[in-house]
Amino acid sequence: MRLARILDKNNQVVYAAEQKDGRLLKIEGDISGGESRITDEAVEPSRWLPPLDPTAILCIGLNYRKHAEEGGVPVPEYPVLFMKNPATATGHREPIELPAVCTDEVDYEAELAVVIGKPACNVSKKDALDCVLGYMCSNDVSARIWQSKLGGSQWCRGKSFNTFAPLGPLLVTRDELPNPNALAIKSILNGETMQSSNTKDMIFDVPTLISFLSEDTTLLPGTVILTGTPEGVGWARNPKVVLKPGDTIAVEIEGLGRLENPVTA
């Protein structure tokens, strides 16, 4: 299923399933594990919401070799974990709001997001994908100076300003995307491709990440794992590229669609 969560014309939250022709058909019932069905009623979004409200957002840094190299840091021996405040989540076409405290340092990061569908603890790599509900496009928006200095040498603060976690536009369930580690991924800023890679270039693939993160730790349903970004981020360029009011930043991942967000002050 290709699941959307939207506000309809009456500003009601609606879950819908995207069809092959692009239409969104309303879903009735409990989509969290109870009975539900796809109706024949087409719905139009007045706003796109994140496909879910994350229980947690766990993030992996430096998970593409060339991204580590462009940042001048060693390739990690183990996954580098940090977290984003779940309240940062925002939807497709919703604005990324530049905070007043960091207007000239905000960067984009195209990432594959993995959504956990059932409690997962001490999961083996072999069984890891059985715990996955589905996948989304994501943008790990980052305030670089806050990330490196002003956040006390911890990445969380510079990654957790409001609207810094666009997710969507859809949640694509695991049955429609059996191999998450062979997907083209790119970011596009104002029509120009900035990042272009493939999830097969991850240092730690999705099963490895789930197994690592679940070691003596329970991943709850609704946990979102951002799996790292490839090379081409703005802060590593010469001259540096930062997001500015009026920009449009998009993330495209093969099989998942296009997540697009305007940038505002």
Image: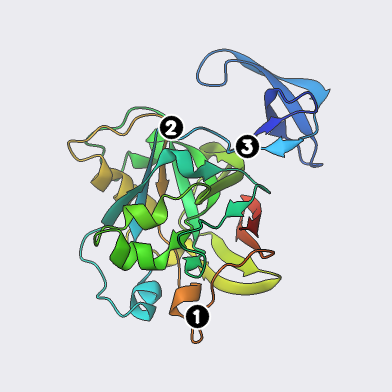
Residue 227 appears in the figure: no
At label 3, the amino acid type is Leu
User: Which circle, 1 or 3, is nearer the viewer?
Assistant: 1
Q: Earlier in the sequence, mark 2 or mark 1?
A: 2
Tell me the element at label 3: loop
The location of residue 206, given as percent across then percent down, is 38, 51
Residue 152 locus on image (x, y percent): 24, 59
- Mark 2 vs mark 3: give the one in front: 3
Determine whether the residue tagged by mark 2 lies in a helix, strand or loop: loop
Task: In the rendered view, tell whether residue 88 sits above or below residue 27.
Answer: below
- The kind of residue tagged 1 is Lys
Q: Which residue is mark 3?
A: 49
Q: Which residue is mark 2?
A: 222
The image quadrant where one finds the N terminus is top right
| Spatial separation of the CA atoms under disc 2 and disc 1 | 35 Å
Residue name at image x 48 percent, y 44 percent: 88
Residue 54 lies in quadrant? top left
